Amino acid sequence: MKQKTLLLINPVNQLRPGFLINTQTRNQPLSLGIIAALTPSDWKIKIIDENFREFRYYEADLVGLTAFTSAAPRAYEIARLYRDKGIPTVLGGIHASMVPEEAGRFVDVVVQGEAEGIWPQVIRDFEAGTLKKYYKAPLEPLIHQPLPRRDLFHPGYVAAVIQTTRGCPMNCSFCSVSAFNGRHYRFRPIDDVLEEYASVP
């Protein structure tokens, strides 16, 4: 039986790279590392990260993308290449979570919310041939995040990123964090944070 391939893509705005010009400020695509860790071990996983490499078409059975609003048009552009070949595309992240109907015009599947609560179901549905158009993860009071697959990140990142909490009570009008992650701090178990810290080179 042929091994299934999951391609995860971190798109970058092609017109205005902005702060990404400075390699010191680039952050690892932590969400993609978490999704990779949530994916069954019998899948082959590859990350294409436009922070460092220009996108080139790569064969896959399933394609997952994440995008901030600034990179959403690029995500839609890449998704179209795979949809034209009949390969299912999934978009998650802050932009897709805020405007799922818009995102749904450009990809096959839209995932709203945090990956831990929904990605295993997406994979099960893909394997069963029953993918839905929209998935929405509930906000869990405690964050149970697996160790991200840092081995899949590009080695050019200057520093690692470790997430310890999600959410914010401030609810600033210009910020999406409260809407996306909730209006109070939600914590990871301290032992989980320490284990991840110890695992980072």
Image (cartoon, grey):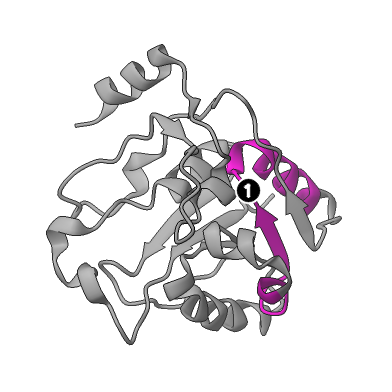
Sort mark 1 into few (<14), some (14-19) or many (20+) by Cα contacts within 10 Å. Answer: many
Q: Is residue 192 above or below residue 120?
A: above
Find disc 1 in the rendering and name its residue.
113
Q: Is 159 or 62 nearer to us in this picture?
A: 159
Quadrant that contains the C terminus: top left
Q: Is residue 96 magenta?
A: no
The magenta segment is: 102-127
Q: Position of residue 145 (x, y in %)?
A: 51, 30
Judged left or right of residue 110, residue 80 is: left
Q: Residue at x 27, y 24 (%)?
A: 197
Give amino acid for label 1: Gly
Q: Is residue 24 above or below residue 52?
A: above
Q: Residue at x 62, y 62 (%)?
A: 98
Judged left or right of residue 38, residue 15 is: left
Q: Position of residue 133 (x, y in %)?
A: 80, 63
Q: Based on the displayed image, in which of its 4 quarters is residue 52 positioned?
A: bottom left
Judged left or right of residue 194, residue 125 is: right
Q: Is residue 23 above or below residue 158?
A: below
Q: Residue at x 84, y 49 (%)?
A: 128
What residue occupies the far top of the structure in this picture? 191
Q: Position of residue 108 (x, y in %)?
A: 73, 70
